[in-house]
Amino acid sequence: DAGVIQSPRHEVTEMGQEVTLRCKPISGHNSLFWYRQTMMRGLELLIYFNNNVPIDDSGMPEDRFSAKMPNASFSTLKIQPSEPRDSAVYFCASSLSFGSGQFFGPGTRLTVL
Amino acid sequence: KNEVEQSPQNLTAQEGEFITINCSYSVGISALHWLQQHPGGGIVSLFMLSSGKKKHGRLIATINIQEKHSSLHITASHPRDSAVYICAVPYSGGGADGLTFGKGTHLIIQP
């Protein structure tokens, strides 16, 4: 298995632009998580899905952030409009079921200028 | 929301030393995770445990549910163990949650 796949691996954009991050979970995994890592705040949960349904999005920082999971093999995290403070590494993780171990993708390093 | 405290934040040791990293949390949980983040940024899950002790190679993780405390031990440490070790627990304590994380322990093993 290829593991959790994220794209792009690096994204540099200008303030005000729309950014879309993509994640393909491990096949057969039912839960998907989006995390963000910054130097100041460490790793933080943004949102997670179970069977493609968003369960908790209380970690999403503001309305500029949205996430979707249209099917079991694909999820997106969108930021519109982006701001410099959104610069971070965004990780996607998946797990076989609730309460089981999570497998992390390689992350997307986002820089907003 | 569960709060996670890790100690120490930074640890430098000589090759061969026994390493202990501690983690405490505020809300009762179903399981605790230990993660390793390599210098290149990738995150690997080391352990998920809900009671007692687990061992994998030179790594040992223990948890005391009553005291809300876990430790990660590394025996016969090696420079390749240098990484950030992160403790994580379910966001609100249950099993059906995303994770909330400690700040991490930055470990450097010198040859």
Image (cartoon, coloured by chain):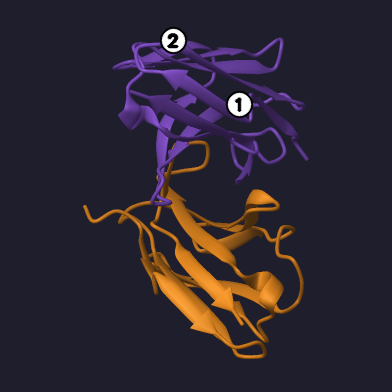
Chain colours: A orange, B purple
Q: Amino acid at mark 2?
A: Phe
Q: Which residue is mark 2?
A: B18
Vertical arrangement, residue A7 with respect to residue A37, above or below? below
Q: Say whether residue A11 is left or right of residue B104.
A: left
The residue that appears at 66% across and 34% down in the rendered structure is B94
Are labels 2 and 1 on one chain? Answer: yes
Q: Quadrant of residue B64?
A: top right
Dot 1 lies on which element?
loop
Q: Nearer the viewer, residue A96 or B62?
A: B62
Image coordinates of residue B68 in percent, x first then y, are 70, 17
For discs 2 and 1, the disc positioned in front in the rendered view: 2
The subunit carrying tag 1 is B
Q: Say whether residue A96 is left or right of residue B22.
A: left
Neighbourhood count class around disc 2 (C-alpha, 10 Å): few under 14, some 14–19, many 20 upward: some
Q: Which residue is mark 1?
A: B30
Q: Amino acid at mark 1?
A: Ser
